[in-house]
Image (cartoon, rainbow, N blue to C red):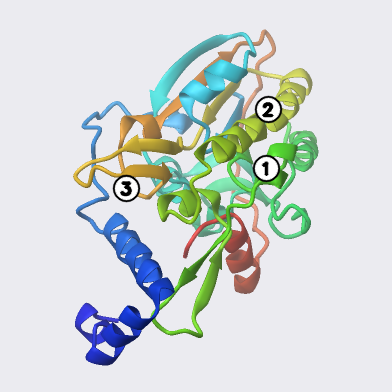
Amino acid sequence: MAIWQRYTPQNLIRLLRNPELIRGETRRLRKDAVNTNAYVSRLVNDDTRMDVMAEDWDNLVILDACRYDLFTARADFGGRTTSKLSPGSESWEFMQASYVGRELHDTVYVTSNPHAYKIPDGTFHAVVNLLDDDWDEETRTVLPETIVERTLEAHERYPDKRIITHFMQPHYPFLGEKGKELDYAGIEMQLDEDEIKKDPHPWNALQYRETTNVSGIVAAYAENLDIVLPHVERLLNELPGKTTITSDHGNLIGERTYPIPVRTYGHPRGLHKRELLEVPWVEIDSDERRDVKAESPEEGDEMADDVIEDRLRHLGYAE
């Protein structure tokens, strides 16, 4: 709805009579500003973005939305640990730059990320998408132990392929005790009184001032990383070959951005700020390397649109 249609005399009177609607409309205007092209800007003018598919590895482990500083403070797998810049600030932007338009027929992609359904058929040799049969209704995500099992099964089935394992953690939903204690979901009031929307996404709740519990949400985010790390360790122990650990993008936890100098949370698409793009890059060598072969792609399973939309919504993505 255009702004001139929203601010009719009748709606302005309703706003003045109902303070809740004023607060809700303020949040809505803030959200609109965050989503404008003026705000979504390229703050890192650096052409040295990582190309994960051009790197030398047998197994690539992706931790979704994992900041470099968070990882280095809490994880130690040995190997060579550096940082790289992701080509995107959210998952689909990363996937577009890394996968789309290429023939990656020597690679199997095991994924719990809902944006993977957008990758064109025939890109990988095979895609093992866990969002349907392996979705956990209670936590509303794919559990890390599940993706480990499916990755090991994929290696047994495709022993001569490179394997990408895309965990959803440390991305929300938060699985630990700190995450379960959070009460961050607010109510966003719209101009129409019957349009009341609950937003369960913690970073959006911080961004739009539904909550001020920054420390609690950041602690739950760190806890989610702690939860997934032992499962990464299991893959390192059981998968042969050279393994690289990285992330598709980082996550802002209150850094100020430009040109609107507001504190920003989450990972808005197109916001190319260094703290959001900088991700860990850990290389763990192995004497046992895989003899990789490219073969024609297998036909993938179709997933219903309503299932995709449900998974995106529960993982905090707006489509």
Percent across and percent down for residue 144 are 73, 39
Q: Amino acid at mark 1?
A: Gly
Q: Position of residue 103 (x, y in %)?
A: 47, 44
x 47%, y 24%: residue: 68
- Residue 301 can be seen in this image: yes
**Label 1–label 2 contact, CB within 8 A:** no
Please provide percent x and percent y for residue 30: 31, 59
Indicate the amino acid at tag 3: Gly
Locate residue 62 relative to residue 307 in the image: left or right.
left
Q: Which residue is mark 3?
A: 270
Which circle marks residue 87 in the picture?
A: none
Q: Residue at x 67, y 19 (%)?
A: 241
Q: Residue at x 53, y 43 (%)?
A: 213
Of residues 97 and 256, which is closer to you in this image? 256
Looking at the image, is mark 3 or mark 2 earlier in the sequence? 2
Residue 84 location, quadrant: top left
Q: Residue at x 65, y 58 (%)?
A: 300
Q: Which residue is mark 2?
A: 226
Q: Does 316 sit above or below residue 239?
A: below
| Secondary structure beneath label 2 | helix
Q: Report the mark closest to the observer, 1 or 2.
A: 1
The disc labelled 2 sits on which kind of residue?
Answer: Asp
Q: Name the foreground residue: 306 vs 24.
A: 24
Circle on res. 179: 1
Neighbor class of circle 2 (other Cα within 10 Å; few <14, some 14-19, many 20+) is some
Q: Whole-Å distance between the Cαs marked 3 and 1?
A: 27 Å
| Marks 3 and 1, the one that precedes in the sequence | 1
Can residue 106 be seen in the rendering of this structure? Answer: no
Mark 3 vs mark 2: give the one in front. Answer: 2
